[in-house]
């Protein structure tokens, strides 16, 4: 029951909940990061083989973990880093202009 | 030219980083020259493949020499060719318009080229995760482009765009993960082969994948309940970026919908009720977008709501799923990209000349700038669908396709959408040609507008008339695309 | 913020080359052990961030100028694409491995992957430093 796949989906749902209910810009960015991490956990767990080792070895007889999800999720992590940096830069800019991070107050201005 | 597919993607990317290096070269307008070359060369490469693709063939290219189920492959078939041609054409138009205003802005051209390279990449690729990566490349470049001028409202709009689009891509990534877990492959063709068997065994999981993808592509293309980012972002972005967003980035969602839905779910879900879902959401989108456009007073916001409404027409064409419906939908994608890009150009010129955003303050401006208002009229007539122009042909195809299915309720709404489109554009034209004298804004200095901006709008106005008179030229490009979608 | 601990200052100065060395190790062993271009590049960038935090951004910027880092980032990307083109010119496809295969388990054994990792590490390290400079200089 408690394995990477289920936890990953729960984490994604937590992120969606945060995105829908929180009205602070920093918390919204955090929710996006949480969603991203949940998907990464989910995808990595799909490719995991219990007791396997990394796919760098000389004899091909031993059990190995599927390397494709790991390579793919590395790309997703890098993209997440870029997007988070950009979102934080925009948040700094918004705070400079409006002196608030609350989206309810931003809507009025 | 066996290497053409990858060169089409990589040359704009190479040019994007070369534009930064023009700082060290004593060359007048170096960035613009590099940007233009970086788009003309891929266009020439693409056209060199044209004869074979229109005849029904396709060109496949394996990255790193690995064959498809293992490696990433790029394929130019009919659908990809149509979209890539549209992207490069509109991209050149945007560069032509930008020549006048953004002098020496290297970063702008760099970001524009990265965005275009992202669109070209996702149009050509056949690997579903690679598609996600190109989506993100495009998205990150476009967030920065929207906030390019550091206006406070533009930054706010860019943040809203970022949050909604990133949430969409996380859901798309989740769908990719589920598909990988089910099939063990990321190649679209090998996933499509296995999906029928999975549907027979466990239909719920396919419903889940479908709905995740529907939400993420719906956010990208502005489908009814998910359209909320469009008006703010389109109206606050700089003018050429508004054209890029409306002309190309909205079409990206439609491309993904066409490609993935027809390839994956063409034999299972679309034969049942899924097509109807797209159809009725399209109907709501078109009527709602038109109604909201009717009450807008800001010119660029009106054009943004008009974009939503026209996307509704395309969704109706896609949702019908017949050959005629797809023909109308693809033709309308082309027409809307062309016309709406030029309409945003016109709006940009008008706003930069008079300094007013509101339509009600634009009374009688045709005496100030007759050329731009005249081409605005032609373009708006084209998008309403008045006979000699191109919008008429595509809307006629969609109506014929709906009539062939005897779906009279949808026809009523389509006519209503067309009439509402006419209503809100005629309101703008009426204001432009009002007999009252134009009231200048006090102490406003108009920005200089060069010949390039005017030229780009006139070129599109002439193109609209030509495509409307000879639609067979475009239909020749659409036929192989339909052959890909409905084999 | 004027109070600066002498210990932190001295240790940062002594540690700085070793952090860079560790980044280089992660980049160059990316195909043999956990690590790779991005991870090593981040370590590389974090060394610059540490210098900026402890010594002040002004001093860090004097050593590593932003223009230079930005240029290095662009050139890294260009080298990546040109390496891809080289495979194409030699008659293979884009980014295919044109180097002779070495022995498995050694650093030069992976052909092109080492070079691509090096360019990526270069790009990521300089890029992260540029992001840091831009964000910090904004506040002051």
Image (cartoon, rainbow, N blue to C red):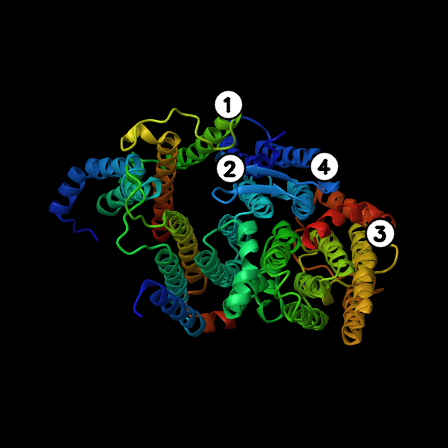
User: Which residue is under mark 2?
Assistant: B63
Callout in the foreground (4, 3): 4
Q: Please tell me whether mark 2 or mark 3 is closer to you in this view.
A: 2
Q: In the orientation shown, which residue stands out farthest toward the bottom?
A: B409
The span from disc 4 to disc 2 (Cα, nearest Å) is 21 Å
Q: Which residue is mark 4?
A: B52
Q: Tag 1, which secondary structure? A: loop
Which residue is more in the foreground, B440 or B223?
B223
The chain holding disc 1 is: C
CA separation in Å, label 3 and label 1:
47 Å
Pointers 2 and 1 in contact (C-beta within 8 Å): no
**Which chain letter goes with mark 3?**
B
Local secondary structure at mark 3: helix
Task: Tell me the residue that label 1 is attached to.
Answer: C90
Q: Which residue is mark 3?
A: B468
Picture quarter containing residue B311? bottom right
Co-location on one chain, circles 3 and 1: no
The secondary structure type at the circle numbered 4 is: helix
Residue B243 at x, y percent in the picture? 65, 52
Callout 2: few (<14), some (14-19), or many (20+) C-alpha neighbours within 10 Å? many
Whichever of labels 4 and 2 marks the residue nearer the N terminus, that label is 4
Which part of the image, by quadrant, shows the N terminus of chain A? bottom left
C14 on left or right of B216: left
Q: Residue B48, percent across and down?
A: 70, 33
- Count neighbours of disc 3 (C-alpha within 10 A) and say few if under 14, some if 14 to 19, many if 20 or more: many
């Amino acid at each position: 029951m408690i394995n990477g796949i289920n936890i990953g989906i729960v984490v994604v749902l937590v992120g969606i909940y945060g995105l829908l209910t929180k009205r602070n810009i920093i918390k919204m960015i955090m929710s996006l990061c949480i969603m991203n991490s949940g998907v990464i956990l989910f995808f990595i767990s799909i490719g995991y083989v219990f007791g396997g080792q990394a796919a760098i070895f000389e004899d091909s007889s031993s059990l190995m973990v599927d390397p494709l999800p790991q390579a793919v999720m590395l790309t997703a992590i890098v993209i997440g880093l870029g997007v988070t940096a950009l979102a934080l830069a925009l948040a700094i800019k918004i705070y400079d202009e409006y002196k608030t991070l609350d989206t309810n107050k931003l809507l009025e201005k | 030219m066996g290497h053409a597919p990858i060169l089409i993607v990589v040359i704009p990317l190479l040019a994007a980083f070369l534009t930064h290096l023009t700082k060290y070269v004593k060359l007048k307008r170096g960035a613009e020259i590099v940007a233009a070359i970086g788009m003309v060369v891929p266009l020439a490469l693409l056209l060199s493949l044209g004869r074979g693709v229109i005849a029904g063939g396709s060109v496949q290219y394996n990255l790193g020499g690995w064959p498809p189920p293992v490696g990433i492959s790029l394929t130019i078939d009919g659908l990809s060719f149509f979209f890539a041609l549209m992207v490069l054409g509109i991209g050149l138009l945007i560069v032509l318009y930008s020549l006048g205003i953004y002098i020496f802005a290297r970063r702008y051209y760099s970001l524009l080229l990265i965005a275009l390279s992202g669109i070209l990449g996702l149009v050509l690729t056949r690997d579903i995760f690679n598609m996600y990566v190109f989506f993100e490349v495009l998205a990150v470049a476009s967030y920065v482009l929207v906030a390019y001028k550091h206006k406070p409202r533009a930054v706010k709009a860019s943040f809203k765009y970022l949050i909604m689009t990133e949430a969409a891509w996380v859901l798309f990534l989740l769908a990719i993960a589920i598909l990988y877990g089910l099939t063990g492959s990321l190649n679209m063709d090998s996933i499509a082969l296995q999906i029928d068997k999975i549907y027979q065994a466990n239909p719920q999981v396919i419903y889940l994948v479908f709905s995740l993808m529907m939400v993420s592509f719906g956010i990208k293309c502005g489908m009814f309940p998910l359209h909320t980012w469009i008006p703010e972002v389109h109206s606050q972005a700089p003018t050429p970026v508004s054209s890029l967003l409306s002309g190309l980035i909205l079409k990206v969602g439609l491309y993904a919908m066409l490609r993935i839905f027809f390839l994956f779910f063409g034999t299972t879900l679309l034969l049942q009720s899924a097509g109807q879902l797209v159809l009725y959401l399209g109907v709501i989108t078109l009527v709602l977008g038109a109604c909201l456009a009717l009450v807008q007073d800001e010119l660029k916001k009106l054009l943004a709501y008009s974009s939503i409404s026209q996307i509704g027409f395309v969704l109706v064409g896609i949702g019908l799923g017949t050959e005629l419906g797809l023909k109308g939908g693809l033709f309308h994608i082309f027409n809307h990209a062309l016309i709406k890009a030029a309409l945003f150009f016109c709006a940009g010129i008008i706003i930069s000349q008079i300094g007013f955003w509101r339509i009600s303050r634009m009374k009688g401006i045709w005496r100030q700038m007759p050329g731009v208002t005249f081409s605005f009229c032609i373009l708006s007539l084209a998008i309403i669908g008045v006979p000699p122009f191109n919008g008429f042909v595509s809307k006629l195809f969609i109506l014929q396709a709906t009539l062939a299915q005897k779906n009279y309720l949808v026809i009523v709404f389509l006519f209503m959408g067309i009439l509402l489109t006419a209503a809100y554009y005629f309101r703008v034209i009426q204001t432009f040609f009002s007999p009252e004298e134009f009231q200048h804004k006090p102490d406003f200095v108009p920005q200089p507008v060069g010949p390039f901006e005017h030229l780009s709008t006139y070129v599109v106005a002439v193109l609209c008339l030509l495509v409307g008179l000879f639609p067979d030229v475009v239909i020749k490009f659409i036929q192989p695309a339909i052959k890909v979608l409905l084999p | 913020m004027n109070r600066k601990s002498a210990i932190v200052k001295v240790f940062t100065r002594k540690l700085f080359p070793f952090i860079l060395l560790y980044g280089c190790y992660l980049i160059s062993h990316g195909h043999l052990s956990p690590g790779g271009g991005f991870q090593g590049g981040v370590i590389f960038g974090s060394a610059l961030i540490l210098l900026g935090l402890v010594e002040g951004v002004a001093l860090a910027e004097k050593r590593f100028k932003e223009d230079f880092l930005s240029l290095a980032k662009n050139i890294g990307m260009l080298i990546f694409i040109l390496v891809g083109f080289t495979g194409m010119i030699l008659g293979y496809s884009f980014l295919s491995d044109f180097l002779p295969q070495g022995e498995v388990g050694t650093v030069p054994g992976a052909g092109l992957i080492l070079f691509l990792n090096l360019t990526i590490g270069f790009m990521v390290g300089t890029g992260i430093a540029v992001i840091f400079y831009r964000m910090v200089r904004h506040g002051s």
